[in-house]
Image: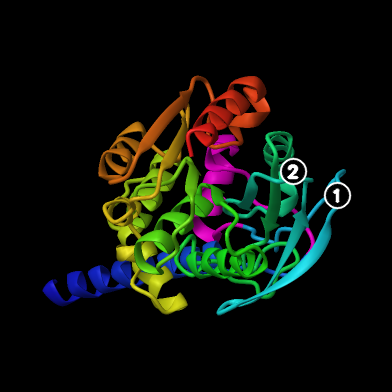
């Protein structure tokens, strides 16, 4: 009887790890197959949630849709992750340059509205595809870890072009976390940073994801983070925006949507409290894990403009 129980427990352990391994791989690796990304857990039916839990997400490489309406040039930026594709659009007598970084399963074409606002405020813009996304090399994402080296590469590119011009970093979701890590651990020192819906840690993000499917977070969330790190060559439990924020002295504007199911109020409170430099915060009511500028264009622009005026 004991031996039979041990075999059952071993089979269960292996099955849970197999599911976590598959989820981690699908979550951090894009495919070149056509099709659309799996909907967010909140949009799935019960059957859809069960299917995703067993098979992982469909994760085709994000493709840029459309190009800027403003004059721009496409530039290639070398990074440790490969060649990054970016769009650079200058403005006459620019006050500085804003480098924009997108979120998970996204690309630079999704940042055109934000870029338009920054240009209106007098800033040139650099819209960057992280490695694995859009026109950049690869099919892999590390959800903010190696993306921080892409932030550093883009920052160095801009600094080589314009050694004394103010450089602002803007990032959403993993773009925000990548900025915080680049400042904390890679020596990037922008004039200011705007971080939109940064998640607290990779582990908390995994927990939030399973919670949204009404699945117990332990042990699946922990195993997902463990296998995701093993598969991609880093310790994913150290991917922690709160820890990064303790080393950030740059003036920072933190933006958050009060209806976000992926990033909690508590996560952003802890990050904001940890920031060591001048800081400002703005919450947007009724907005989830999505671009705030789409629902609150005037308020978003006014908040960003007021922050930048003080830099």
- Look at the image and tell me in which quarter the N terminus lies: bottom left
Residue at the (32%, 46%) spot, across then down: 216
Residue at the (73%, 37%) spot, across then down: 113
Mark number for residue 112? 2
Q: Is residue 281 above or below residue 11?
A: above
Judged from the image, the secondary structure of the residue bearing numbered disc 2 is helix
Lower sequence index among marks 1 and 2: 1
Residue at the (67%, 63%) spot, across then down: 133
Tell me residue 261's x, y (percent).
45, 35
The residues bearing labels 1 and 2 have C-alpha atoms spaced at a distance of 9 Å
Q: Looking at this view, is 274 or 174 the one in front? A: 274
Snapshot colouring = rainbow
Residue 205 is inside the magenta segment: no
- Residue 258 shows in the view: no
Task: Locate residue 158 relative to residue 5 in the image: left or right.
Answer: right
Judged from the image, the secondary structure of the residue bearing numbered disc 1 is loop
Tag 1 and tag 2, C-beta contact below 8 Å = yes
Tell me residue 80's x, y (percent).
55, 79
| Residue underneath mark 1 | 66
Q: Quadrant of residue 161?
A: bottom right
Q: Is residue 277 above or below residue 25?
A: above
Tell me residue 141's x, y (percent).
55, 66
- Tell me where the magenta segment starts and ends, as one range: 34-57
The crowding category of the residue bearing disc 2, from other C-alpha atoms within 10 Å (few below 14, some 14 to 19, many at least 20), is: some
The crowding category of the residue bearing disc 1, from other C-alpha atoms within 10 Å (few below 14, some 14 to 19, many at least 20), is: few
Tell me residue 269's x, y (percent).
30, 35
């Amino acid at each position: 009887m004991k031996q039979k129980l041990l075999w059952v427990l071993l089979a269960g352990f292996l099955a849970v790890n197999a599911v976590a391994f598959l989820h981690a791989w699908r979550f951090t690796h894009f495919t070149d197959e056509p099709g659309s990304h799996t909907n967010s857990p909140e949009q799935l039916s019960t059957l859809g949630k069960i299917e995703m839990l067993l098979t992982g997400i469909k994760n085709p490489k994000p493709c840029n849709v459309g190009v800027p309406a403003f004059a721009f040039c496409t530039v290639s930026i070398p990074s440790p992750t490969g060649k990054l594709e970016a769009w650079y659009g200058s403005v006459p007598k620019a006050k500085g340059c804003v480098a924009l970084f997108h979120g998970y399963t996204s690309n630079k074409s999704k940042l055109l509205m934000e870029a338009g606002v920054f240009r209106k405020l007098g800033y040139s813009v650099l819209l960057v595809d992280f490695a694995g996304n859009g026109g950049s090399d690869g099919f892999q994402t590390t959800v903010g870890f190696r993306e921080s080296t892409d932030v550093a590469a883009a920052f160095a590119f801009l600094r080589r072009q314009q050694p004394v011009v103010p450089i602002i970093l803007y990032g959403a979701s993993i773009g925000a976390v990548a900025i915080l890590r680049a400042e904390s651990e890679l020596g990037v020192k922008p004039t200011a940073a705007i971080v939109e819906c940064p998640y607290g840690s990779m582990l908390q993000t995994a927990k939030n994801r399973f919670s949204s499917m009404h699945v117990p977070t332990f042990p699946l969330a922990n195993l997902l983070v463990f296998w995701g790190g093993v598969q991609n060559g880093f310790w994913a439990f150290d991917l922690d925006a709160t820890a990064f924020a303790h080393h950030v002295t740059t003036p920072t504007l933190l933006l958050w949507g009060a209806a976000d199911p992926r990033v909690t109020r508590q996560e952003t409170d802890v990050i904001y409290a940890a920031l060591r430099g001048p800081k400002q915060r703005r919450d947007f009511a009724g907005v989830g894990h999505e671009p705030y500028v789409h629902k609150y264009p005037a308020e978003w622009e006014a908040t960003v403009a007021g922050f930048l005026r003080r830099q």
